[in-house]
Image: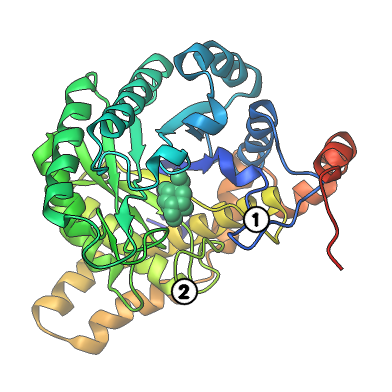
Amino acid sequence: MSHEQIAAAALDQLAIELPSWGFANTGTRFGKFLQAAAATTLEEKFADAAQVHALTGACPTLALHVLWDLPGGVADVARVQALEARHGVRAGSINPNLFQGQRYKHGSVGNPDPAIRAEALAHLRESVDIARQLGSRDLSLWFADGSNYPGTQHIRQRKHWFAEALSMVHERLGPGQRMLVEYKPFEPAFYHTDIADWGMALLLAREAGPQAHVLVDTGHHYQSQNIEQIVAWLLDEQRLGGFHFNDRRYADDDLTLGSIDPYQVFRIFHEIQQFAWERGAAPDLAYMVDQSHNLKGKIEAMIQTVRTAQELWVKAALVDREALAGHQAACRLVEAERCLTDAFATDTRPLVTAWATARGLPPDPFVAFRESGYLETITRERGDRNLASVTSYA
Ligand code: AFD
Ligand code: MN
Ligand code: MN
């Protein structure tokens, strides 16, 4: 197959889910720089996501955050369905919110107070119902639960509470639905986080049931951790549910994918495509973006992330897997390594552009967005409202 054919086949497989929260002003714990064009309503989030999808051809679904996007819970499902129809983007994974309520100060499903654990479980169950009514396959579970000081919480007891809650959520899942258990080593808890690494997430997913899988957020690892090795193990265990894409220099920085370490993203993609090549079928993974930019323009950063993911995905598709297998078996180290480095060194931008133009998409989505006038329009429509709350600090 030619590089063009390989690229086209690979890109046709890659659907990237956008986060609703990525279009809104979110900022950091030190404050946020309000953007005049930021989305505030769910309608605006769908409209902005639809722009990214129309320009990249790769983003048919939008991840929703229950409290932020469906404050009325299942009562808001009809409103979401209307927005799906109007904007041509479907609701994607459903993200419960168990980290903002004051009652969750000492945890949600890991809270020592059984009444609070029950409230958290009720929210999780409603989130499953929302997903089922929207036809969303995935419930995306991230828990901020943990503690800040040694001795303040019973780690094993909380482990049992988590196992109990996740098993009860699993019982609520309908056919074809999945629950993705996300792990994160720290933040906002700074001494222990109840689901801190991939091993804890895997054990909890296994105990919950066959429809539970692990969600790998690329920003949720210690410095220099080998993420592609974790991905390879979870693939082999058939327990990799998908990803939250972002990049990091130090912690969960939620930077644009590939902006710091594109070779790591490539190696993750290589493990996935190696697995697919050996099995003769691509694993069913959710490729989701989890970024919300405080400095870059929201939509532009999302376009950049999607295009970068496409370029790196094609690079991984260009690895000569037959040759690699032979070099690995014979321990021809440099030759084996060069199978990866040669593919990574290939400029795949023309290949992604060819794939896009063959599908009637703009050759460069970033330029097309800049020329579209959409940013000027939403800035005019949203600016006064978005900046009304700015209190300038000298
Ligand atoms: C934060 C958390 C986690 C979660 C995301 C969306 O660190 O990554 O998936 O919010 O709720 O980034
Ligand atoms: Mn995440
Ligand atoms: Mn995160």
Residue 300: give x, y in percent of width and height: 70, 53
Query: Gap between marks 2 and 1, in whole Å?
Result: 16 Å
Q: In which quarter of the image is the C terminus?
A: bottom right
Check residue 56 in the rendering and tell me which mark sits there, or answer none: none
Task: Please count the marks in the image.
Answer: 2
Which residue lies under the disc numbered 2? Answer: 261
Circle 1: residue type: Ala
SS of the residue under disc 1: helix
Q: x, y (%) of residue 179?
A: 27, 35
Q: Nearer the viewer, residue 340 or 307?
A: 307
Q: Is residue 41 left or right of residue 356?
A: right
- Could you tell me residue 358's position as x and y percent? 60, 42
Q: Report the amino acid beneath label 2.
A: Asp
Percent across and percent down for residue 168 are 17, 27
Q: Quadrant of residue 149?
A: bottom left
Q: Quadrant of residue 175?
A: top left
Which residue is label 1 attached to? 301
233 left or right, relative to 317: left
Residue at position x 34%, y 32% in the image: 138
